[in-house]
Image (cartoon, grey):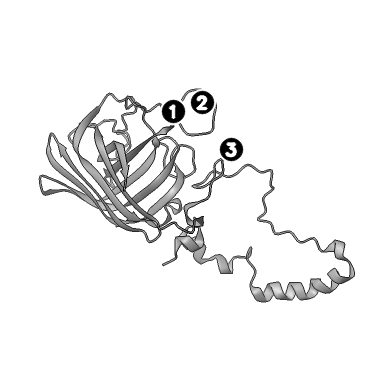
Amino acid sequence: MVNKRETGFIPKKAAATLPGNHLFPSRHTMKQHLNTLLPLCLLWLPACNFTVTDGTSPTDPPKRGPRTQPGATMQIYAPEQHDLYDGRFIISGARIYQVGTLNDESPWDHMGNDGSNLRPVEGTAELDVDEIDNTGTFRAELELPEGSYVIELEEFKEFSPCQDGGIAAWLFEHGDSGCGDAYWPKSILYVAGWGIGSATLNGKPLYRDYQIHFMVTQGMRDRNLVAHYPIIGKKSQAGAVNPALQQLDFYIRSPETNDANIPNREVFDHFFAMEVTWK
């Protein structure tokens, strides 16, 4: 297993191929080049101006991706650059709302940006994960009008490279970030997980082998639970979020799609917690 602390936020498959990449010549090849160039350097020092480049210009705007966004005016250190980073996130979500219900007839909207189809539910969502090793647990135990409802993520799994093995921390996702879909606005995800899991209702299986995603984000909804997304005439390239708020958003969805629904899934049970506690 590739250790994220050693590779940074390079996807594991890409990191595994770096030694053979033409941008990173072998020590033997570099030694041959130096043996040729050093005598020339001794004869004419001004010629020895070596530059290592990745093919981009310093004036080029940063590309959209999990760790870089154009127009950003602040730079911070990634988690894996910190000597004390242990990759452990233990977080609870409370004051939870469901978007829609379990039995809505298609077509339905289970994003609920305008806040009109939300209902508060009792219970908590708990995550305890190791972002470096892509291990841990996510479980939500909720009391819905339909009964006791439990979601559990059973296997962490990436569905795109920016998900970094199934658990990732401190990345941009959604909106125009270049990572994830555009159903949510672009936000910093303090920690997020993706994978396969199940749900039960009153102790009986409801869904099996469905896709699950959780993410601790900046405030995608305001204090009145409305998501102002998309913003018409937005002046900044930053996402339509309030950095003074934080939330835990999670869903379980079917592999089967249905283009009549928003999002376009046959099943999409969507919840968010407006009280987030780090432990």
**Secondary structure under the numbered disc 2 in the rendered image:** loop
Residue at image position (69%, 48%) is 57
Amino acid at circle 3 = Thr
Residue at image position (29%, 40%) is 265
Q: Quadrant of residue 242?
A: top left
Q: Is residue 21 left or right of residue 153?
A: right
Q: Label 1 neighbourhood size at 10 Å, few (<14), some (14-19), many (20+)?
A: some
Amino acid at circle 2 = Lys
Q: Is residue 206 left or right of residue 84?
A: left
Q: CA distance from mark 3 to mark 1?
A: 22 Å
Please state which of the two labelled residues, at mark 2 or mark 3, is closer to the viewer. 3
Q: Position of residue 211 (x, y in %)?
A: 29, 49
Q: Which mark is residue 230?
A: 1
17 above or below 266? below
Which residue is label 3 attached to?
73
Quadrant location, the N terminus: bottom left
Q: Is residue 210 left or right of residue 238?
A: left
Q: Position of residue 249 (x, y in %)?
A: 32, 40
**Secondary structure under the numbered disc 3 in the rendered image:** loop
Q: Would you say residue 158 is visible in this rendering?
A: no
Q: Are marks 2 and 1 in contact (CB under 8 Å)?
A: yes
Residue at image position (22%, 29%) is 119
Q: Position of residue 151 (x, y in %)?
A: 21, 47
